[in-house]
Image (cartoon, helix red, strand yellow):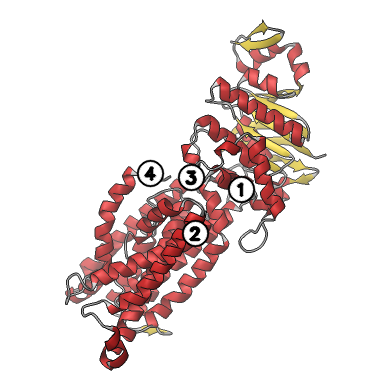
Amino acid sequence: MSFILQKLLILTALSILSIVALPFIGMELISIDQLLTDSFHRDIFLTLRLPRVLTAFLAGGGLAVCGLVFQSLFRNPMADPYTLGIASGASFGAAAVILSGAAGAALLGVPATAIGALCGAGLSFTLVLAFSGVITASTAGRRAAASSPHTILLAGIAVSFFFSSLLMFLQYMSDMRESFHIVRWLMGGVDVFGYKPLLTMLPFVAVGLILITSNVTALDHFLTGDDVAQTRGVRVRLSRGLLLCAASVTVGGVVSVCGPICFVGMMVPHLCRGLFGASHKILLPACLMAGGVFLSVCDALARTVAAPAEIPVGVITALLGGPFLVWVSRSRRF
Amino acid sequence: MSCINAETLSFSYGGKSVLEDVALTVNTGETWAVVGRNGVGKSTLIKCLCGLLSPVQGTVSIDGIDIAKTPPKELAKKIAYVPQGVNRPTPPFTVREYVSMALFPYGTGFMGRLSDDNKKGVDDALSLTDTDRLADRTMNTLSGGELQSALIAGAVAQSTPFLLLDEPTTHLDPFHKKNIRQVIERIHKERGTAVITVTHDVNFALSAHKNILAIINGKIFFNGSRDKFCIDAVNNLEKIFSIKFNAVGVDEKVYFCE
């Protein structure tokens, strides 16, 4: 136990370090001296680098926690916002907004693409739940476990393909400029300007995380099987519905600002399980911090590797994700 | 003393009738074996008893209160369920973590805090089921017999007056089988827990349980004490399993074999 706490402490130190140190790194290194004396560099640091690192940290943490929730709920190492169709729904929503020419508009300060993405995420998620019978009423005599993890996963994959093809259709119908805009959005990125995107995302992630935290013991139980969970007093359907909603709200918030950033939600929980064991009371903060560190470091790579050009951070995470999948298939933790 | 009571219980999976008009009363302090061929509705019956399945007709009540109207956490303080050990998901919890999780219905507050008394229940459950030596092993490293004991330890920690076991000895070797039988006896003797075991192992059913509920095609064939069952055991067994049985006597003990 104390060994795990030690590791958690190290992770906390790493988180603080990455938030403090990474804003200095970029196309051009900023020295502490420059930060204190030069107003040009201070502006870059405060309005570009710092919000960017914070956005990356929050997005990475949020995605990792959602990945953790999905994997445990479905007892499946492949479950993440992507396999469940939420990300493709969000992408479709954003693309639809871009194509309608309303991409520049905003509602209450939230950009239209973000609203489109949120709606898309909500729509695809509702479809997945409806298809898999989570929200359709159960009648007496039906198996209590009608909404088994496999059914939901299959529904997620089906919905994901559906929205992906709709997205391809939209792209095909769009002109060069719109098409490029859509493609760039699909690559995912945290290149924000100022703190507004961070503030757009924060309430979603915060609400999601609070709901997930309040159900953290139920997550442990889901890993041992729905039947045992239920006979131990867990309201299986209610808890699962609540956790799914919480995770989807979080993903929706993150994707609406950063676009679909793949594999963070799949990789980070796996690494954390290896380091911290199975208890979600430990895994939850661990994933939040590890996801944050992971994505902010990836983003620091993205803005330095090909400097002065910047690579979308989604490209880096996806590049790491491929080999990682191979590794997962060789080491089973479920 | 507590009492679980099933009345005119019927259940069907998608139109196919599985249980028909089953009635059963079990008091604390009793041990029951539910026997029958594969697919006659044994597991379905005990899933109805603990609320995992809701019957098409009839009710299950504990101390006169319908379990369908009991909040899940309250129900979890009354009745514990141990599923079949094979093909279970075995997450990398340590055995101690797994057993501790059974205290969920006793937790209070935002994150489910537990009192020290509750926590002591975990150690008691581990020692009663002889799993204290496994406490720090993770579930995915246990053998079949060890896993079964760990699953039972979890249910014991739930401190319920009723305990349901679904085929606890299937796939186990004679050594672990005997171990499970001793664990059941200890739970029954030291806690007065009513144990209801689903099994198709005739000798295990008759040696470890004082009462027998035999099911043939979803209907109750026999409901009563072991002694009454054994008056005409060979005939009863033949009707239940549709094959001939022989009684073999060894050192004043009687065993039944096909």
Query: Relative to the observer, which residue lies in front, B164 or A53?
Result: A53
Q: Is residue B47 above or below residue B179?
A: below
Q: Position of residue A77 (x, y in %)?
A: 39, 49
The residue type indicated by label 1 comes to Ser
* Residues behind callouts 1 and 2 on a single chain: no
Q: Is residue A25 above or below residue A74?
A: below
Q: Earlier in the sequence, mark 1 or mark 3?
A: 3
Label 1 resides on the chain identified as B
- Mark 4 residue element: loop
Mark toward the viewer: 1 or 2: 2
The residue type indicated by label 2 comes to Leu
The answer to whether A134 appears left or right of A15 in the picture is right
CB atoms of marks 1 and 3 within 8 Å: no
Q: Residue at 73% x, 32% y: name it.
A: B188
The residue type indicated by label 3 comes to Pro
The residue type indicated by label 4 comes to Arg
Q: CA distance from mark 3 to mark 4?
A: 11 Å
Q: Position of residue A259 (x, y in %)?
A: 32, 70
Circle 3 sits on which residue? B91
Q: Residue at 31% x, 68% y: name it.
A: A297
- The dot on residue A332 is 4
- Mark 1 residue element: helix
- The quarter of the image holding the N terminus of chain B is top right
Q: Is residue A86 visible?
A: yes
Q: Residue at 40% x, 85% y: name it.
A: A109
Mark toward the viewer: 2 or 4: 2
Q: Pick out the residue farthest to the right.
A: B1
Label 4 resides on the chain identified as A
Circle 1 sits on which residue? B100
Circle 2 sits on which residue? A5
CB atoms of marks 4 and 1 within 8 Å: no
- Mark 2 residue element: helix
